[in-house]
Amino acid sequence: MDFWAEIVGQGEATRILHRAAAADGAPAHAWLITGPPGSGRSNLAFRFAAALIARDESEREAVWAQVRARTHPDLGVLTTQKLLIDIRAARDIVTTAHYAPAEGRYRVIVIEDADRMPERTSNVLLKALEEPPERTIWILCAPSEADLLPTIRSRSRSLRLVTPSAAEIAGLLHERDGIDAEAAERAARLAQSHIGMARRLASDPEAMQRRDRTIGIALSVGTLGEAMAAAASLAGVAKADADALTEQLDAREREDAMRSLGLAPGAAIPPQMRAQMRALEEDQKRRATRSLRDGIDRILTDLLSLYRDVLLTALLSEAGDGGGAAPVELVNREQAARVSELAEGWGARRALAAVTAVETARERLGRGITPALVLEALFARLLAGGDRA
């Protein structure tokens, strides 16, 4: 089970997949891994893929290195940097499902963000699931089962992940990555148990500074002019954050790809290998087009944590129980004084309206509305006390 050690807080799920991937196991031909953002859906899916491809447990780490770099010949990946998965990409990946494994026990196809498939794209996949090749296994990832067609759900074995606790994530950061215990706790708490974001906040001081700046900007708004300035500033924060993340991911993926091809970092790429590197570069360019929107969504998630802190504090204050209730466990503990001030000035009703306003902004962002307009509308609404104009 050491192979699964980096999967945090998913003990039951890893036990199920460990048994399914055993040499004498009989894994289902299609799996649907669901769970909230940050629960580790994709990481678990690719770990499972490596375990299925490896001919025995001794090969798993070597196969995992190739799977992580997306270069193993028995791995297929369908993902998108757009809002929806293109039907042509789905048709292409379905065609490869009929290839026999080149090196491993199974050919495995992972569909990240399976919830981004519109109905006609889903129907392409459905046909492949109805008549699955003998040695091909599909792994789909989505936030919930409801995000996929019932006919696809009925042909897949579902595995529901849970949100890891902040303590579990902090423990992983401390024990595996050597992060100071206090810094690991803060990162896990501020990331609201999102594993990838917690790792970034703990290991990248600039990422933590950008989050602190986000909260500081939101707390400084008092006039309409400040609201519009805050929207513009946060758009800039999101762009800086997205650019930094993209640069890190691009460099790591290129290094992994070079290593898997047997090339030293910075070495010239032989002509016969250039097609693989070009494909990687094209994927990275497509990811860059979605990075700003993802950065805005991360900012909205941070703002949501702030206004939820205010709401909980206001509710406790209005309960007037004489201090008998348990203290509020704030996400933004470092801003406790300002949170209390806002809770007293706003009250629970306005704090609830602020939470609703952020959730509405996230929904608008998901519908493709221009990020700058989403932020401007949000701060105008927050300034008006949450009432619609």
Image (spheres, grey):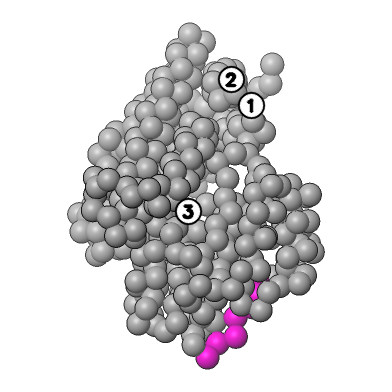
Main SS of the magenta segment? Answer: loop
Q: Mark 3 or mark 2, which has the lower sequence index? A: 3
Residue at 78% x, 50% y is: 119
C-alpha distance separating marks 3 and 1: 24 Å
Vertical comparison of 42 with 30: above or below: above
Residue receiving disc 3: 38
Pointers 1 and 2 in contact (C-beta within 8 Å)? yes
Q: Quadrant of the C terminus?
A: top right
Q: Residue furthest bottom?
A: 24
C-alpha distance separating marks 3 and 2: 27 Å
Mark 2: secondary structure? helix
- Looking at the rendered structure, the kind of residue marked 2 is Leu
Residue receiving disc 1: 369
Q: Residue 119 magenta-drawn?
A: no
The x, y position of residue 143, in whole percent, is 61, 55
The x, y position of residue 132, in whole percent, is 71, 72
- Looking at the rendered structure, the kind of residue marked 3 is Gly
